[in-house]
Image (cartoon, rainbow, N blue to C red):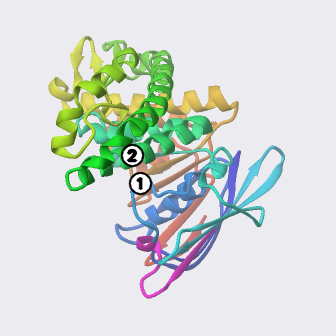
Amino acid sequence: MIVKRLELNQFRNYESLDLSFDPHTNIIFGKNGQGKTNILEAVFMSSTSRSHRGSRDREMIRFGQREAHIRTTVWKDEQDIQIDLHLRSSKSKGIAINRVPIHRAADLFGILNAVVFSPEDLQIIKNGPQERRSFLNQSLSQLDKVYLHDLSMYHKALGQRNQLLKDSRFEPSLLDTLDIWDEQVLQYGIKIIRRREAFVDDINTCIVPIHREITGGKEQIQVIYEKNTEEKDFRRQLERMRERDLKEGTTHVGPHRDDLRFEANGMDMRTFGSQGQQRTCALSLKLSSIQIMENSLQETPVLLLDDVLSELDSARQNLLLQSIQKIQTIITCTGYDDFIKNRFHLDKVFEVEDGKVFERS
């Protein structure tokens, strides 16, 4: 699977753009603020329908415009597949595959599998649990459409339950329906917990040898799934916390409060790890997620490296670049850096300046 072509119209700072990528290594360089990351964002949107930056559709439409278009041509299963995204400022986005509209974003998942690695990802170990849950959800949604459905249904039920908790203060009769939403939260929450448990097992299988290699055998890593509640205790905990939920208007029990913990040689990396150790853990996590995707889907994902090489020391740069030689990779950086030219074969090079892209030899 490779991205062959990307066409943009009124997207971010691009009035119009048409790029053809090499199946191997592509580098996009230029000064900050010129639009390099916007290209990766468009590719990732074609994979998941969402921005890896968390941006809303209207924020990605070029200033002064009401609509934007992304068209991505993917080579998969010996054929071209065209993915079209139509972003609109006042309506939900339109999505089409080979010019046939689809009505659920979930139907897009699995056509183009992409892994994005940005400087923010290097902070995943030490930042808050929301980022680690986002990693779980983003990874699992690309691997498993059933998980994506269960996650969507869980958040809908959770939203309804939380709204009921708030509204019941003014209309107590609404509490008669609370049990219904409890059952929905339990039904889909248990499925999410089970799938996350299996995924974390897969992560540990892959990440241990990767991390051992990165650290020269000095560190033994373990990823621990810190469940907010065990499956067998979920119902009892939900009932036990009902009074507090009603008082505070929110649900305190469930997988929406899960977290991951990273331990190296038994030491919690978030609390006690150095910045270098935390970054090494994050790098190991990303490399293991690529391996899991390859193993599960029997094809390599497209790797998007968003100015991440400058954040790594020379040893970690080398390891990352060596690990991705068989993967189509699109790399952004602020300069045509010597460490890339000297150590990595580049198949296509683009320079970005103020929303204009020029192919360089």
Q: Residue at x 50, y 37 (%)?
A: 139
Q: Nearer the viewer, residue 212 or 12?
A: 12
Quarter of the figure that contains the N terminus: top right
Q: Quadrant of residue 37?
A: bottom left
Q: Is residue 59 part of the magenta span, yes or no? A: yes
Q: Earlier in the sequence, mark 1 or mark 2?
A: 2
Q: Which mark is residue 220?
A: none
- Tell us which disc is closer to us: 1 or 2: 2
Q: Nearer the viewer, residue 88 or 122?
A: 88
Q: Which mark is residue 337?
A: 1
SS for tag 2?
A: helix
Tell me where the magenta segment starts and ends, as one range.
58-70
Q: On the image, numbered disc 2 is attached to which residue? A: 309
In the rendered image, residue 187, in percent from the top left (x then y), is placed at: 48, 30
Query: Amino acid type of disc 2?
Result: Leu
Are the residues at dot 1 and dot 2 in contact (C-beta closer than 8 Å)? yes
Q: Is residue 222 part of the magenta span, yes or no? A: no
Quarter of the figure that contains the C terminus: bottom right
Neighbour class for label 2 at 10 Å: few (<14), some, many (≥20)? many
Q: Residue at x 30, y 41 (%)?
A: 130
Is residue 225 among the parts visible in the rendering?
no
**249 on left or right of 178:** left
